[in-house]
Amino acid sequence: MSRRGRTRPPLALVGPAALGIAFLTIPLLAMVFLAPWRDLPRLLSSPHVVQALRLSLLTATLSAALCLLVGVPLGWLLSRSNSRASRVIRALVTVPLVLPPVVGGVALLLAYGRTGLVGRQLYAATGWQIPFTTVAVVLAQTFVALPFMVVTIEGAMRAAGEQLVEAASTLGASGWFAFRTVTLPLLGPSIAAGAVLSWARALGEFGATVTFAGNLPGVTQAMPSAVYRAFESDPPTAVALSLVLLLVSVTVLIAFRDRWRPGTTSW
Amino acid sequence: MVSSAALTIDAHVRRGDFHLDVAVVVQPGETVGVIGPNGAGKTTLLRAVAGLTALERGRILLGATPWDDPEAGVFVDPTRRQCPVVFQDYRLFPHLSVLDNVSYPHRAQGASRQSARTHASETLERLGLAELASRMPRQLSGGQAQRVAMARALTMTPQALLLDEPLAALDARTRQQVRMDLKAALTRFDGPTLLITHDPLEAMTLADRLLVLENGAVTQIAPPHEVAARPVSDYVARLVGINLYSGTLVAPGSVELTDSGGRLRTASDGSDTLGVGQPTLVALAPSAIAVHLERPTALSAQNVWPGRIRGVETLRDRIRLDVDGAPPALVDITQAAFAQLGLDLGATVWLSAKATEVVAYGAPVL
């Protein structure tokens, strides 16, 4: 025991831990050090890159909106029930969290492709098919991002609960007042967090997108796909695009770091 | 304080196979303790009075004002009953400070933030909680949270107060202190209070009258000492730790026990209005029964019967025997006596009880 009352961490643990830190941070530092900083404005303003950027912002935002629209009610529903059916649904809904995104893309093709389970009917009825369109990008991103929303909302709903609203009503609060002063403040941060999380996940989505939507500049080529393509022909552009994605990730992390650290949730 | 009115409850609620059927009037300033086993309908009753559950039949009135009267088509929203519930888990708003929690009822009634906080501060001050004002609920101990929940309810000058097992979530030591505070707060509150509990000590110390609720129906309404001395159901008898038998008065001072067999002489029927042939309840405290190894002969006790020890339980300062006989009885003896007599499971003993300790009374018709 040291004088401070804390045991000195054993070297056998400090060594691997330091290795882990180095392993995770060196690639990020490498990117920052080796980035073509001087050419950055030119690289990022090339029409090709702007196109990818714009498509990414558009599709990720649409995906996040879809996640909000569907994920909030779904999270609410799951938080209200502990039946066997809801446990099965919960498991199914969270599969995309661990599923390799490429597999997600294959599954989406089999479901909504031109000859897919649902896509076939759609194609027969309208002559329109989803794959390799911007819609496909949005669907692929939503597929991987939705579970983040659902899990976030369900957790928050369980913590908030109907009981507080009941207590509020016996204290004289009308339904709207209770919603405004109890439900919304308790859920608002989680809804925002869920939206940002799913937006960030959608922005970074690659595997499912490339499989289901392809890699067509201007139509389905979002940032990660553009990075992948550019790396073959134009590495500096790839690095520049990667920097942008890194910046977004770090911003999201800083903005919401308190919400993800276990044990520090604000309620 | 505003002038207070009585709370008249005549509640009928059906939940599947379960029927709640309760009639009681809680006077201004009075605390009625609702005691009963789990699933008896205590919470349903409280929710009906709060307006969180609607009556199927019957009426709930505050003074002359109907809160719920399905026949007349009247239902006052919980929002407008001014009848707060202090829940077992307190249900403080986790995102609001103690001050804002206590301000909440004022804000809900449309007061400005400033004036609501002024009212809330006064209440906290009055209840000795001022130093907690800026804390968040998660920074409170269980006892503090309970007091804050109480403050939040009392600050709105309630018409009636509902307490749902207010001390159940506290550890034993905290509970004692909070119970005293709660007692003081209830004494000052001049409206009717309904207190739900399954803790006999809480019921005895906090309530002016007890309402025993079993299977959705009232089995007894009486002052606590009366319930303890003359329980009318096995549930209450077990709860207060007293032997209860039912029987028939076969002759003056003599009760034939119906279910358990045997006969007990009582000296308490003189003042009662019991008639021969009438159904009778008999209560006998475990401490009023003596244990002997041989049949006692020269003894003033007028009740003597044999039995066999089928259970031994150590209480704090004594030993409780469960003796099978006619009638069976719980018997409390000192540890010294237990050792001296060399008693153990299966031992055959003789029990004796004075006729003056045997309390006979008519089963009340409810």
Image (cartoon, rainbow, N blue to C red):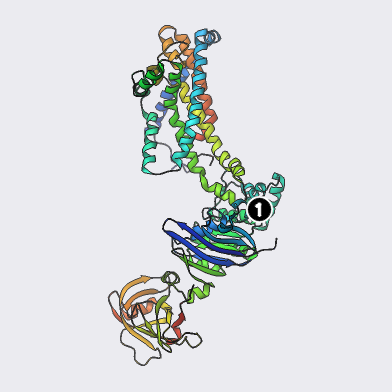
- Which residue appears farthest toward the bottom when viewing the image? B298
User: Residue B297, image x and y in percent?
Assistant: 34, 91
Give the position of the N terminus of chain A as an image quadrant: top left
SS class, disc 1: helix
A125 above or below B359? above
Specify the subunit that label 1 lies on. Answer: B
Which quadrant would residue B124 be assigned to in this image? bottom right
Which quadrant would residue A101 be assigned to in this image? top left
Residue lying at 45% horizontally and 83% vertically, measured from the top left = B357
Closest to the observer: B297 or B86?
Answer: B86
Asked whether residue A146 appears in the rendered view, the answer is: yes
Q: Which amino acid does label 1 sit on?
A: Ala
B162 above or below B227? above
Asked whether residue B333 appears in the rendered view, the answer is: no
Closest to the observer: B364 or B176?
Answer: B364
Label 1 sits on residue: B130
User: Residue B258, image x and y in percent?
Assistant: 36, 79
B134 above or below B10? above
Q: Is B85 on the left-hand or right-hand side of A133?
A: right
Q: Report crowding for label 1: few under 14, some 14 to 19, many 20 or more residues within 10 A (C-alpha).
A: some
User: Residue A113, image x and y in percent?
Assistant: 36, 19
Q: Is A44 on the left-hand or right-hand side of B128?
A: left
Q: How many marks?
A: 1
Closest to the observer: B301 or B34?
Answer: B34
A198 above or below B106? above
